[in-house]
């Protein structure tokens, strides 16, 4: 939780109840002060915050009830983190979305899902500098995030250790090492409570880290000029949203690994001069390499997943750009990149729905909540 030394869903709930700034949406935690923390921790210490699973809901769903001397307020979100579908005070409806609007459907996302990977790449290729220049905002933000973690030794020291090994010559100062370092540092800072902002991708700051920094490192390595880095970043973001649209939000699979790293691999392959066919090879290779990694919540340990999957993305991009592709007969691989993505989505849902429940059970048992 940014600006908070303590973590967990109960801490987030207590902070939300104390902050009272819903207009900030996903930047709600920006306003945390020492007084906010003190007030939130009092709620926790008095055991008035309770978190439990609603077993009847299978996708993103949160219902919050706040009881004060002024009455009882309830709010529900569904499908997306900012998609409030109902708010009541003492049982009186203050806001309610129509049933047909509650799924938080997005026409742009639906149009994106109907496209082929090659069509997404072609669309990006038609963009000009003025349309894509904002992509550099994400590079600046996430580079600052990575540097903050390295300087302040954030998280558990993953990035600091990688940097030490590079300086000692145990790891070379290669592109792969730099990708590992940047991904680890930014993810560790992001999930370790660093107060700096990050550019998200498909609604997630960590996904933004996995997409932005590795792609930009490759762009610098190949000395890409003019629009190429911007187009590669845009392609990575669009592919990340495309794959996430099929996998879904908050399931048992780590979408940073399956979606974001696969998107990054596709964009890297393009930077290496890869054709649409070779980009398809990259996605096929990633389908075999990273499918099935579980998601057990956002925490500092995700930095290790960022290291492993971005390294895999770079490896598979290099292989694909040299026409090295796994056989269609390998496991869940398929002939087309679109079918590979659909196969990955099937691993997530329905394949790992029961796994998701067990992951949640384990997490609650550790906290003595079950």
Image: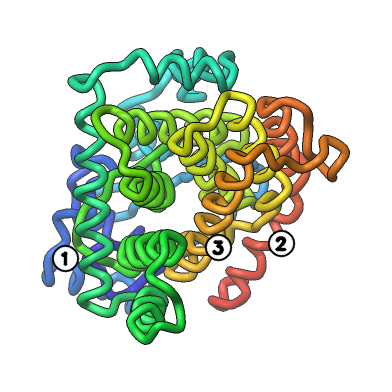
Provide the residue designation for mark 3.
Answer: 308
Provide the residue designation for mark 1.
Answer: 36
Q: Is residue 310 above or below residue 75?
A: below
Q: Residues within 10 Å of mark 2 (few under 14, many from 20)?
A: few
Disc 3, SS: helix
Disc 1, SS: helix
Label annotation for residue 358: 2
Q: Disc 2 to disc 3, how far (Cα)?
A: 24 Å
**Residue name at image x 25 percent, y 26 percent:** 132
- The quadrant of the picture occupied by the N terminus is bottom left
Q: Position of residue 247 (x, y in %)?
A: 62, 37
Q: Is residue 24 above or below residue 86?
A: below
Q: Disc 3 to disc 1, how far (Cα)?
A: 36 Å
The reply to whether residue 83 is in sight is yes
Q: Please name whichever residue, 244 or 90, is drawn nearer the observer in this view of the structure.
A: 244
Quarter of the image for residue 245 reads top right
């Amino acid at each position: 939780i940014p600006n908070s030394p303590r973590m967990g869903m109960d801490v987030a709930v207590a902070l939300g109840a104390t902050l009272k700034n819903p207009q900030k949406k996903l930047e709600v935690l920006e306003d945390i002060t020492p007084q906010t923390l003190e007030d939130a921790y009092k709620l926790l210490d008095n055991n008035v915050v309770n978190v439990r699973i609603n077993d009847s809901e299978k996708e993103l769903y949160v219902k919050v009830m706040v009881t004060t001397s002024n009455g009882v307020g309830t709010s529900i979100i569904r499908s997306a983190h900012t998609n409030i579908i109902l708010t009541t005070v003492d049982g009186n409806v203050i806001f309610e979305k129509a049933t047909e609007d509650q799924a938080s459907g997005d026409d742009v996302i639906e149009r994106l899902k109907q496209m082929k990977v090659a069509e997404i790449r072609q669309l990006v290729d038609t963009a000009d500098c003025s349309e894509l220049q904002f992509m550099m905002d994400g590079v600046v933000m996430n580079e600052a995030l990575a540097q903050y973690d390295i300087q302040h030794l954030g998280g558990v020291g993953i990035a600091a250790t990688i940097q030490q090994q590079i300086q000692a010559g145990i790891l070379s100062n290669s592109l792969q090492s730099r990708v590992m370092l940047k991904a680890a540092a930014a993810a560790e800072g992001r999930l370790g409570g660093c107060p700096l902002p990050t550019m998200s991708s498909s609604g997630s700051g960590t996904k933004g880290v996995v997409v932005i920094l590795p792609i930009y490192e490759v762009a610098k390595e190949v000395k890409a000029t003019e629009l190429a880095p911007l187009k590669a970043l845009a392609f990575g973001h669009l592919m990340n949203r495309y794959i996430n649209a099929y996998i879904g939000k908050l399931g048992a699979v780590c979408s940073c690994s399956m979606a974001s790293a696969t998107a990054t691999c596709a964009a890297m392959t393009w930077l290496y001069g890869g054709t649409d066919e070779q980009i398809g090879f990259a996605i096929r290779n990633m389908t075999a390499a990273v499918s099935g990694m579980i998601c057990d919540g956002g925490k500092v340990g995700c930095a290790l997943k960022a290291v492993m999957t971005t390294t895999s993305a770079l490896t598979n991009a290099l292989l694909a750009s040299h026409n090295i592709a796994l056989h269609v007969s390998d496991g869940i691989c398929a002939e087309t990149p679109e079918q590979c993505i659909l196969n990955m989505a099937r691993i997530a849902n329905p394949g790992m729905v029961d796994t998701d429940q067990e992951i949640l059970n384990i997490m609650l048992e550790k906290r003595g909540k079950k």
